[in-house]
Image (cartoon, rainbow, N blue to C red):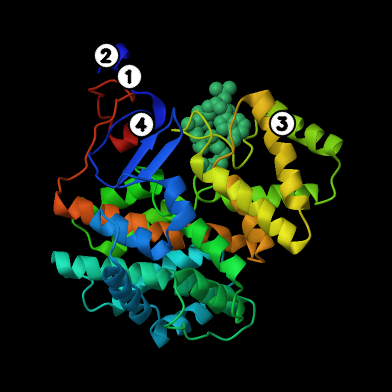
Amino acid sequence: MTTAEKPKGGLEDVVATSSAICYLDGDRGVLAYCGHDIHDLAKSATFEEVCYLLWHRRLPTRAELGDLQSQLAAARPLPESIIRLMRSLPPVNGMDALRTITSALGHYDAEADDSSPQAQYRKAVRLTAQTGTVVATWGRLRAGGGPIAPDPVMRHAANFLYLLTGERPNATSIRAFDCALVLHADHELNASTFAARVAAATLTDMYSAVVAGICALKGPLHGGANAEVMKMLLDFGQHATAERVDEAIRAKFARKEKIPGFGHRVYHTEDPRATHLRQMSLELGKRAGNTSWYDLSQRIEALVKSEKKLNANVDFYSASTYYTLGIPIDLYTPIFAVSRMSGWTAHVLEQYANNRLIRPRADYTGPEYPQRFIPLDQR
Ligand SMILES: CC(C)(COP(=O)(O)OP(=O)(O)OC[C@H]1O[C@@H](n2cnc3c(N)ncnc32)[C@H](O)[C@@H]1OP(=O)(O)O)[C@@H](O)C(=O)NCCC(=O)NCCS
């Protein structure tokens, strides 16, 4: 490779595959699932409709949606041994628990190694259904509650909140959470989806492929950012003065620290998901009679935008949204996975359907070849 061919770091701007699932235009701030603009989906679609869209590349009819809802409902309960495994884990972080439990779920799936397209599809449905139950049940057990059986009548968003809190959620919370799931469902070749596709391209099983995705999502440069945002907001405190916030953010700039929830590899304008989450954070705050987390977020956003020209990304306002919904902070990134499981599995299905091993090359920068081998006792 010559100097002129040296790659930009992080595969920036590299088109690594073809995909019919997600359309992204970073300059215009466009995100669309199978041609459907995210603004339309956020306003009008349920998470279940989006799952169907990602897996089938078209919106479902009412009958098809009903079938999918029944399949998800049937798959939602967890094997008793999985609940026992959850109870046996030390008090680890939510993403670590999700990684271990998702891996273990594969042991209880009789079709785990069945590579027929029909079995792969059924696994996509099961994994998506069960991830919600895993994260909510984990959160509940850890808080000292007992596991709750999923309600077959409730949809995905409502079930999650019910399994987590033990209380039937109100319509506003369900709608906000459902919309958050819609917004996080897919995002083209983001780091975790790419990791899942790379694993799938070896023809490993679907559980292994999505565990690769979970591992990549955990990092603070990717899905882990939403929890980091909330920790930052809590550090400031909801009654922090504007002067204190500005001073602390500028000090972070001076230390060259990244501000969680800002910047994006692809968007050079507003992340269209942030538009909805900002609004949701405000509305939930107003309903709860406390917009201070939203106000604090606004202050930070204005400063980062004016001084660094960086836009808020999907993780920035999801933090105050989830906080106002009463969700524990270390479940924020697992909730990202509850939604993204639909996108990971859609991409894994697409990869299996037209597979070639993903095996790029590296620009070698090590010691010159050949090196003389010096025997151990002469070194
Ligand atoms: C998302 C992210 C990883 C994209 O990274 P990237 O495309 O590799 O961009 P870089 O990290 O190379 O950043 C480019 C420049 O913007 C700055 N920058 C990017 N994001 C920043 C942030 N959140 N806070 C402060 N500065 C930031 C970098 O310091 C760098 O400045 P420099 O050129 O003066 O060194 C990055 O913006 C980031 O770390 N954001 C915070 C974590 C986050 O919110 N992740 C969730 C993404 S959805």
Q: Nearer the viewer, mark 2 or mark 4?
A: 4
Which one is closest to the eye, mark 4 or mark 1?
4
State the SS at label 2.
loop
Under mark 4, the amino acid is Leu
Mark identifier at residue 11: 4
- Measured Cα–Cα span from mark 4 to mark 3: 30 Å
Residue position for label 2: 2
Q: CA distance from mark 2 to mark 4?
A: 17 Å
Secondary element under disc 4, as helix, strand or loop, is helix
Query: Which sits earlier in the primary sequence, circle 3 or circle 2?
Result: 2
Whether residue 55 sits left or right of residue 166 in the image: it is: left
The 10 Å Cα crowd at callout 3, few under 14, some 14 to 19, many 20 or more, is some
Residue found at x 67% / y 66%? 326
Tell me the residue at 57%/73% (across/down).
Answer: 139
Residue beneath label 1, please? 6
Instruction: Give residue 262's quadrant in the image.
Output: top right
Q: Using the image as rendered, state which of residue 307 and residue 41 is in the foreground.
A: 41
Q: Residues within 10 Å of mark 4 (few under 14, many from 20)?
A: few
Question: Quadrant of the image for the N terminus?
Answer: top left
SS assignment at label 3: helix
Task: Determine the image quadrant of residue 94.
Answer: bottom right
Q: Secondary structure at mark 1?
A: loop
Q: Is mark 3 within 8 Å of ligand 1?
A: no
Earlier in the chain: of badge 4 and badge 3, it is: 4
